[in-house]
Image: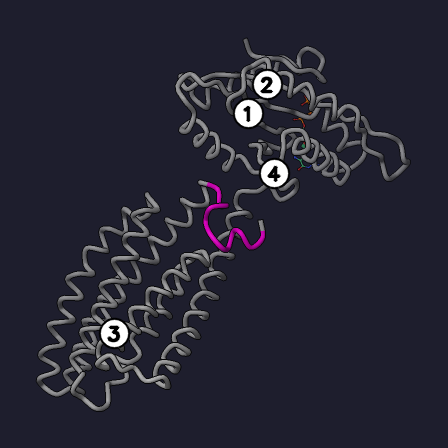
Amino acid sequence: MGLKEYWSDRSHSQDFKLIRIGFVAVRFRWLVSLLLIGIAGWIAVDWWVLDSAHFHLLWKVRLMAGVMLTPLLPLSYLCKLNRRWMVLSLFALLVILLLFNAVSLWSFRDVAAMPTGYMAFPYFLLALLAVLPLPIRSGVRVAVTIIAAVLATDYWLDSHTLSNGKLIERVWLLLCFSLAMLWVQTGQLRMLLDLYRESTRDPLTRLMNRRLFMEQFKAVRHNSKLGEMCSVILFDLDKFKRINDEHGHLIGDEVLVNVSTTLVDIFGQDATVARYGGEEFVVLLPNTELEQGVRQAETLRLAVESQPIESPLDESEISVTVSAGVAAGDNTHTISELLQRADEALYQAKSRGRNCVIAYE
Ligand SMILES: Nc1nc2c(ncn2[C@@H]2O[C@H](COP(=O)(O)OP(=O)(O)OP(=O)(O)O)[C@@H](O)[C@H]2O)c(=O)[nH]1
């Protein structure tokens, strides 16, 4: 995946997208709450440092900003459901804060030295937005919006005569803060991706774990057309306890890793293949009829059988075999129903002597 997963969310799985949006929504809510407190609390500072004319104008501007920001709090609960709501809320936040910035700077147009707090507001905004784990592309869009709005405000307030020196200084500082924001945002995204992988991947085989498998199964079900069949295959290693007992758990682990590699080789990198339990694996085949599912299971069974593991102790070959149960169904069957059927077929495969594939009919 590499840089692609940091650049945009297109390469992220649906499950991760939802988790990230949920995380962004919580941080967004905190951000809006802090801004509301900060914008209101600053009235006390203004009362202390500003003259009465500026104070009377600015507390009303602050009140307006507060009133406009408040609906973003309930909106943040909708954000976690949908990416569009998230983008809309972020855009609304930027518009309100950049308007607040423009109006407050405009109120000081007749003053020689602008108060530092107001001058620093765009940089403060860039620093605050660093708490959101946004992909680089979204972060760049946020930074460009802020830089463009700040420069437009400067141009407007300087009677369209923004001097080169002032412009370069402003752009330089905004770029530095934007880069810092992007750096922190990417770090947050990376941390989230790492945590997600740790919580959804099996540490031994690196296949997806049961939790993620169930999520993927739900998503496949959700996206499948009416009447479209999907197949589920449950694989279980035969007499695996004996391999552990005779050759040790480390060899047992090696066998599990080998079988998982064969699974990925046969079903492909993007297939929904998971470690379902100790020595049990599961494969979901969307848009696949039962016969085709059985053929694929048979391919895996033969591949595992033909690849014995070499024992490091006496270089003897440890033969490994799997049994499989296959079930197929359309949207009228629940996920647990399909898994239950595959499990029953697997049970039959075990009772019929193992190293075979049985379909649930
Ligand atoms: N090495 C190793 N063994 C594991 C792991 N997870 C589960 N096991 C072992 O897998 C074995 C499963 O044994 P059983 O459920 O009796 O099944 P089996 O011996 O494969 O027999 P059948 O399934 O009936 O063919 C147990 O001995 C577990 O300790 C693991 O991560 N590594």
Q: Nearer the viewer, residue 316 or 96?
A: 96
Residue on which the image places disc 3: 153
Q: Residues within 10 Å of mark 1 (few under 14, many from 20)?
A: many
Q: CA separation, marks 3 and 2? A: 63 Å
**In terms of sequence position, does the residue under pointer 1 or pointer 4 come before the other?**
4
Q: Which residues are magenta?
A: 2-13
Location of residue 156 with respect to 145 vertically, above or below:
below
Can you tell which of label 3 and label 1 is closer to the viewer? 3
Left or right: residue 308 versus residue 22 is right
Residue on which the image places disc 4: 207
Q: Which residue is depicted at the point 24% across and 90% down?
A: 113
Residue on which the image places disc 2: 293
Q: Nearer the viewer, residue 155 or 296?
A: 155
**In terms of sequence position, does the residue under pointer 3 or pointer 1 come before the other?**
3
> Residue 285, which numbered label?
1
Q: Residues within 10 Å of mark 2 (few under 14, many from 20)?
A: many
Location of residue 38 with respect to 159 vertically, above or below:
above
Q: CA separation, marks 1 and 4? A: 16 Å
Q: Amino acid at mark 4?
A: Leu
Can you tell which of label 3 and label 4 is closer to the viewer? 3
Location of residue 176 with respect to 282 vertically, above or below:
below
